[in-house]
Image (cartoon, rainbow, N blue to C red):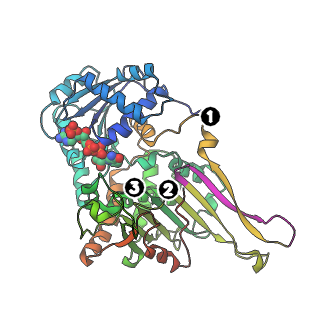
Amino acid sequence: MVSRVIPVEPFDLVVFGATGDLARRKILPALFRRFCAGQIPGGTRIIGAARSEFSITGYRDKLAADLKQNTSEKICDADVLAAFLQLVTYVPLDGSGETGWPALCESLSASGAERVKVFYFSVGPALFEPLAERLHSYGLTNAATRIVVEKPFGHDLASARDLNRTLASHFDEGQIYRIDHYLGKETVQNLMAVRFGNMLFEPLWNSQYVDHIQITVAETVGVLGREDYYERAGAMRDMTQNHLMQLLCLIAMEPPAKFDPDAVRDEKLKVIRALDPVEPYHIVRGQYAPAAGAVGRDLNYRETVDNQRSSTESYIALKTHISNWRWAGTPFYLRTGKRLKARSSVINVMFKDAPHSIFGEEAGRHANHLKIRLQPNEGITLSVTIKEPGPGGMRLMDVPLDMSFAEALGPEGSEPADAYERLIMDVVRGNQTLFMRGDEVEAAWGWTDPIIADWQARGDVPKPYESGSTGPGDADLLLRRDQREWRGINP
Ligand code: NAP
């Protein structure tokens, strides 16, 4: 099954922070791959901007080297690469000063007012407001302008509100694309397709049939390279307030009346607003530490951030409830952490046992469960109970009905599209469905802030857990107290 490529009109895209990690590893390779797929037409202009001095040729050379490193050999054909580089220019510019802005204006003046102009803020959050202000004061905004704002969107509710207010003074909400790359993942969108495109699941998608839901985002990497940011953020701000919250919304929301940006985001917002405050004893915070005898870089959180008294969590597990008719009584268990035993993002929807077993005790109790794998090996597995083969009575066993999206959907040899490819092209097309609205972000901070304030008030210190493990033992207790257990952290 070959995915359809819907070309767009030529557009201008300015990447602020074009020399940074995100732009080099994700944004520019995503644009290149869309170009290779035939989606980005000639006449499109991609303008890199950052303070570093580069000539246009110098920047193109550097970009060519990055693209060779960050895209597979299969698509990195020399002629195609050369054609792509012709779309790219570079302007040295200070986002918080005035240097380079006249040159950027000059460069953009060549295209008409109606042409879509995307300004991607791939810079630290301190630059979001200065960039928005300068785009406005240099006359670079009109109805065709869109801005893409990276995470973190604020540090708490007050700062998110301030940022929303500043952006709103220069742009309509319809021009602001707050990116959470999790929402661009194929499986995340498939969550909506599976739920709302099939009759099969939706009637069962409620507290009458679902025992509980687990959302796990596990990483094997530590915080090396992002120490300063992470020490200020921790797992709650870095992952829970945004990525896990978005997954929770998509899994729990009511069916929107249509697949349109505001209809979807209205339903997500209702989920966040219906979230119960989390009791302190329903949260486990952890911090990675080396296993006995283990040596290596970044196995010890406190050493990595150079703060032996750090109380920032690199792991969090929590239990929450959604107080509405659909979900009352069904707990949602969320966990995320760094330096865990495997890299995997998985949602497990655990259905209840059948109300009565006609096969007797010896057949065992079996409950269905739906495992949604976001990464790696994107796909869905439904565990179904069948009879154990062979004579000797009726014993039951679980077998997986497994669908790997790569096998089911990918033409042979194709690579799945990266989330950034989809999201950037959505910005160009003007589709905000997979981007967070201002009120959603504020509501998520509104739920998170009291939890963090409580830790600070109590001087809470995270529990150490061994690097390479599944996290602190207390996280297991969180479920065991409810006679449940975590599904394994497996890809
Ligand atoms: P980074 O590697 O530190 O890059 C920052 C970029 O900003 C560089 O290109 C830098 O270039 C430019 N810059 C800094 N000060 C500037 C100024 N005054 N005017 C113009 N440009 C300036 O950061 P990053 O990792 O790419 O992250 C960028 C943003 O994306 C951050 O908000 C981050 O939280 C977010 N994000 C990153 C990732 C990731 O995987 N990296 C993932 C999710 C979100 P010069 O020094 O040449 O000016």
Q: Amino acid at mark 1?
A: Glu
Question: Of the numbered discs in the image, which one, if any, rests on residue 344?
Answer: 2
Q: Which residue is mark 3?
A: 221
State the residue at coordinates (28%, 65%): 302
Query: To which quarter of the image does residue 142 belong?
Result: top left
State the residue at coordinates (35%, 20%): 86
Q: Nearer the viewer, residue 218 or 174?
A: 218
CA neighbours of label 2 inside 10 A, class few (<14), some (14 to 19), many (20+)? many
**Residue range of the region highlighted in magenta in the rendering:** 373-392
Q: Is residue 247 above or below residue 448?
A: above
Nearer-N-terminus badge (1/2): 2
Q: Amino acid at mark 2?
A: Ser
Q: Amino acid at mark 3?
A: Val
Quadrant in the picture for the N terminus: top right
Q: Which residue is mark 1?
A: 412
Q: Nearer the viewer, residue 441 or 214?
A: 214
Query: To which quarter of the image does residue 206 belong?
Result: bottom right
